[in-house]
Amino acid sequence: MNKISRFFLWALEEHPGKLSGILAGFGIGLLVVVLGFWKALVLALFVLVGLILGKRHDDHKDLFGWLDRFFH
């Protein structure tokens, strides 16, 4: 195993929040450079909505009841 792989495994075990924050920031920054600010913002909002809906599904919560309350 090379040094980079060991470093990422160590960072994932010891500092998962920092590593995910760095990767998310890098990804969003890259999207802003490639797509532009507004398109990247819309894409980030869709990803956030997908994350929220997916988490509710994973937690076995009533998705349709929540959506009904949210939109009415």
Image (spheres, rainbow, N blue to C red):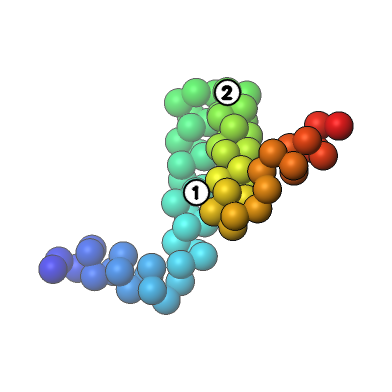
Pick whichever, 17 or 36, lies toward us. Answer: 17
Position in image of residue 60 (x %, y %): 59, 55
Position in image of residue 43 (x %, y %): 56, 29
Compute the Cα span from label 1 to label 2: 16 Å
**Which amino acid type is shown beneath numbered disc 1?**
Ala
SS at mark 2 in the image: helix
Q: Which residue is mark 1?
A: 24
SS at mark 1 in the image: helix
Classify residue 37 by image quadrant: top right
Position in image of residue 7 (x %, y %): 29, 69
Q: Residue at x 24, y 70 (%)?
A: 6
Position in image of residue 68 (x %, y %): 78, 35
**Which amino acid type is shown beneath numbered disc 2?**
Lys
Q: Is residue 18 visible?
A: yes
Q: Say whether residue 48 is left or right of residue 25.
A: right
Q: In which quadrant will I find the N terminus?
A: bottom left
Q: Say whether residue 69 is left or right of residue 3.
A: right
Q: Residue at x 57, y 49 (%)?
A: 57
Q: Earlier in the sequence, mark 1 or mark 2?
A: 1
Q: Residue at x 65, y 53 (%)?
A: 61
Tell me if residue 12 comes above or below residue 48 in the rendering: below
Q: Which residue is mark 2?
A: 39
Q: Is residue 48 visible?
A: no
Residue most extreme to the left? 1
Tell me if residue 28 comes above or below residue 1 in the rendering: above
Number of callouts in the render?
A: 2
Pick whichever, 65 or 6, lies toward us. Answer: 65
Classify residue 58 by image quadrant: bottom right
Q: Residues within 10 Å of mark 2 (few under 14, many from 20)?
A: few
Q: Residues within 10 Å of mark 1 (few under 14, many from 20)?
A: few
